């Protein structure tokens, strides 16, 4: 790496921030760091792109996002929609769909399977009432018990038009295709990246709170992320017991979420670095 001569060195996260600094110094390049650069001073980088839930300081080289930077925009959605329909042509007839994104357990918390089962039953009921189709994907972290329940509930359900079990048959356009074809997206609370992508899609987004264990406490960065997006009306936070009324309100047009637009902050950071 030190033999390469670069204009910019871009890294993500604290583990690579030191390498970014060394390589940028050797190349006399401008370092750009995405996320908090660990113990290194922010002034060591030309630009730092940090999410609000990391409590970034007010500095001229720090650019604040609300979620995780991601690829989701209109072009991305169009490409993934086209790829998904090419794979599964029957999806081209979908007019109204609910996308469901199921994450999994993390080092801090486990998903409450019982609560999520109740939430999924509610979604099935509301989909029937609204004549809406269901597009669902799990993640590789989804607990086996929940995967089994999802298969039982949705495999033979007539309104299930797409069911992706990530550990069995995943494909790269599944997530983006679901976001492109859905009008409402329901996601579990465990993944900042997954929620950021959903909120960037322009859909109305519901996030189900169902974690147990140590959980996302009020002082945690994860909870700060969820609360910030809710306060900005970019997601709707709910538990399983109130999911039905939130879905009714969305379907009736009484409430709607706004689009997460973090790309503007990333663009400003790049312009500043240049």
Image: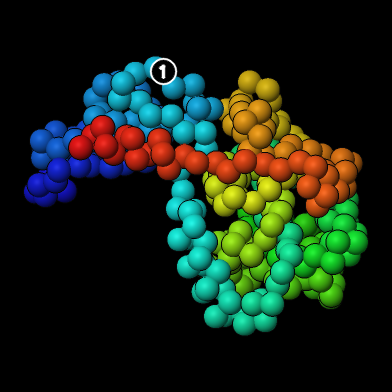
How many numbered marks appear?
1
The answer to whether residue 18 is seen in the rendering is no
> In the image shown, does 85 or 138 lie closer to the viewer?
85
Name the residue: 63% across, 71% down.
168
Residue 157 percent location from the top left of the image: 85, 72
Say left or right for 260 vs 184: left
The residue indicated by pointer 1 is 57
Quarter of image, res 161: bottom right
Say left or right for 66 vs 99: left
Residue at the extreme top of the image, as rendered? 58
Residue 82 percent location from the top left of the image: 52, 73
Name the residue: 52% across, 38% down.
67
Residue 198 percent location from the top left of the image: 60, 50
Work out whether 177 lies above or below 8: below
Residue 2 percent location from the top left of the image: 12, 45
Q: Which secondary structure lies at badge 1?
A: loop
């Amino acid at each position: 790496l030190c033999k390469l001569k670069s204009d910019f060195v871009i890294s993500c996260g604290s583990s690579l921030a030191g390498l970014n600094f060394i390589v940028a110094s050797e190349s006399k390049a401008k370092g750009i760091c995405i996320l908090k650069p660990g113990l290194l001073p922010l002034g060591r980088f030309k630009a730092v792109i940090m999410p609000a839930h990391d409590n970034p300081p007010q500095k001229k080289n720090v650019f604040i996002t609300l979620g995780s930077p991601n690829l989701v925009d209109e072009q991305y959605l169009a490409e993934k929609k086209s790829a998904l329909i090419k794979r599964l042509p029957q999806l081209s007839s979908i007019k109204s769909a609910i996308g469901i994104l199921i994450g999994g357990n993390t080092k801090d918390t486990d998903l409450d399977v019982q609560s999520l089962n109740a939430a999924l039953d509610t979604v099935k009921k509301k989909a029937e009432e609204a004549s809406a189709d269901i597009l669902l994907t799990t993640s590789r972290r989804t607990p086996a018990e929940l995967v089994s329940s999802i298969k039982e509930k949705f495999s033979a359900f007539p309104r299930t038009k797409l069911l992706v079990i990530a550990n069995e048959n995943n494909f790269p356009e599944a997530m983006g295709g679901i976001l492109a074809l859905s009008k409402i997206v329901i996601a579990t609370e465990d993944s900042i990246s997954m929620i950021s992508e959903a909120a960037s899609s322009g859909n109305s987004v519901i996030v189900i709170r169902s974690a147990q264990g140590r959980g996302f406490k009020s002082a945690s960065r994860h909870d700060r992320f969820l609360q910030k997006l809710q306060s900005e009306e970019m997601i709707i936070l709910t538990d399983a017991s109130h999911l039905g009324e939130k879905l009714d309100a969305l379907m009736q047009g009484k409430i709607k979420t706004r689009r997460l637009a973090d790309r503007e902050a990333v663009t400003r950071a790049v312009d500043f670095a240049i």
